[in-house]
Image (cartoon, coloured by chain):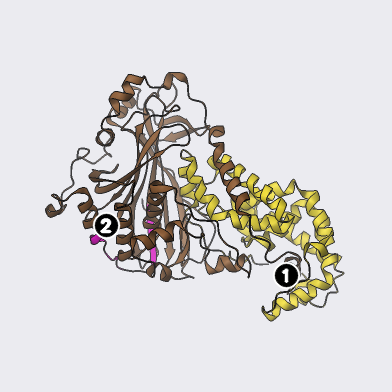
Amino acid sequence: MEAPPSVVPPWQDDATVIKRSWDEPECFGAVFDSHYTEIHRYASRRLGPHAADDVCAETFALAFRQRRRYDLSRSSARPWLYGIATNVISRHRRDEVRLLRAVDRLRPVTESAGGHEDEVTAKVSAEGVKGTLARAVAALPVDQRDVLLLVVLSGLSYEEVAQALDVPFGTVSSRLNRARKRLRKALGGTNPLLDEEEMHR
Amino acid sequence: MNDLDLVRGLYDEDPPPPDNKAMAQARARMLSQADTVRSRPRRAWRLPLGLVAAAMVTSVVAGMTLMANDPGDSRRPGETKGGVDPSTQTLSPRGMMLAAASQAERQPQGRYWFTHQRTGLPLLALGQTGGYVVEERSEAFEWTGRTRGDGQAFYGRDFAGRPQTDADVKAWRDAGSPRTWQVRSSGVTRTISTESGTWRADQNKHAGGAFNIPGVGSFTYAELQDLPTEPEELRKLLCEGRVRHTPEVAEQLGRGGIAGARKRCDGAFGVLNKVFFTLGNTPVPPKVRAGLMRLLTDYPGVRRLGTVTDPLGRTGVALATSYESRDGRGTIQRDLLFDQRTGKVLGSRDILQKPGPDSQAWQVPGRILGYWLILDSGWTDANPHLPD
């Protein structure tokens, strides 16, 4: 499985802005302004909008306090911020599991019109299996779920996910593979919409 | 279609955007922690009141005489480098700025745009061989392909530290010229070396073709060419509306789109910083560069300093504004320096005007408290190579 390239262009100035914020704290506001909505969206999807406010406030407060430990050779702060947010979210593990188990309420069926054919197909098939799938995601070990959801929800490359979680690249691949195996097993390996190729990996 | 797509289908495509009030509170909460990361200064570091008053008189001039020369630079601080057009010598500081703006030249375009920058942060050297001020310096070099697909790279390194002023150089020699120094700021103790570190590359690969202005948003090369040129329109671009995502980010963030945070400028200081970020980090065309310089030259709260010399000994024409440090270091003047002949931005520097309750003894009016310099920037057709 080849890692996809990151689809999001760099925020190439984070490193210099963060460096500057070491002794000029207000400078860190630029990092907040650039990334808050994106991190909020990630937290909101995993925990719902209300918890997302708290998670985000905590994430950026932590990031600010840890700004001296930021690796300045990394131009974009996105992996770092996603990593901190993921750690904060892990403290809300029970809420996340509860939301996943009540997934039909989490995502009411109000499909917007339009969209590509693939996406429509994805949604239709997801409607059929989403209860089963949500329970399977809820049952994943936390470290596997974090990798899976960072890959699926953040748009980070595998390399960036490794940075976010501060684990080796190989660990990301192996956790993701284990998570996917469990999900396929939960789906019974019979969903006709899954690629044959994917199924036999 | 695979299992990852199915998992994605479980999650809300477009969750409600963040609540503005919650966002404002989170931002304020974050920044209000400033005191928790700074060590409390010792009382002995506070400045006697009489000395403050005496030293406050001419901060800008003192700021220049306090700078040590870079090794190999024989010019005295403040001395003008040869080659400044004599016809501009008689201009007022405002006239000099506008003349520099009109000089903004079109750079020959190439496939890759690069910038090489250096920051400096003066800190007190600790321990038995310390007691003077040394500069912690770091460098960044990055290049971005003009077209998406041409790539992008970012490198950083620790740059050799050095004693800050001539007096600091003497104190360092008297202490036996140690090759490393212990320093402490923001609650963290660390070591500065007289040797530069090696360049470290950011491993993340990106497609290029996008230029980011912190707190404003991301723009393609083509979009930069179409930015407004009138000062007031540029102010709106920098300070109003919401931070802009590139089409790719917007797509990633959901088809309904999700708005970025509100832009904010917080007065002349905020505008000066945004102008610096724009000029230092993007290849905006000359007419936009000139518009940004005009915006800042006549912005309320901005002072026009005329000719000054930067920490590398380069002569420039400068604009300045003052801000109150949030961490107790007092009133600080931030200068933005431009090359008078090319209109290129040379960098920014902070000079202490009036010490605050947490200023250290060496932080007297006129001291440089930090700088951020653009050493070089421009276009190349070959893949850019790292500076030595």
* Lower sequence index among marks 2 and 1: 1
Q: Colour of chain A?
A: yellow
Please report the bounds of the magenta region as a residue range.
B101-116
Q: Give, as a three-letter code, the residue at label 2.
A: Gly
In the displayed structure, would residue B151 be above or below residue B361?
Answer: below
Q: Which residue position holds label 1?
A: B5
Q: In the image, what residue occupies the spot 51% across and 47% down?
A: A29
Q: Residue furthest bottom?
A: A117
- Say which colour chain B has: brown
Residue A26, position as x, y percentages in the image: 49, 43
What type is the residue that disc 1 sits on?
Asp
Q: Which mark is residue B104?
A: none
Spatial CA span between label 2 and label 1: 51 Å
The disc placed on residue B343 is: 2
Q: Give the chain letter at badge 2.
A: B
Number of marks = 2
Query: Quick check: can you spot residue B353?
Result: yes
| Residue for point 22% across, 38% down | B77
Q: Position of residue B47 (x, y in %)?
A: 38, 22
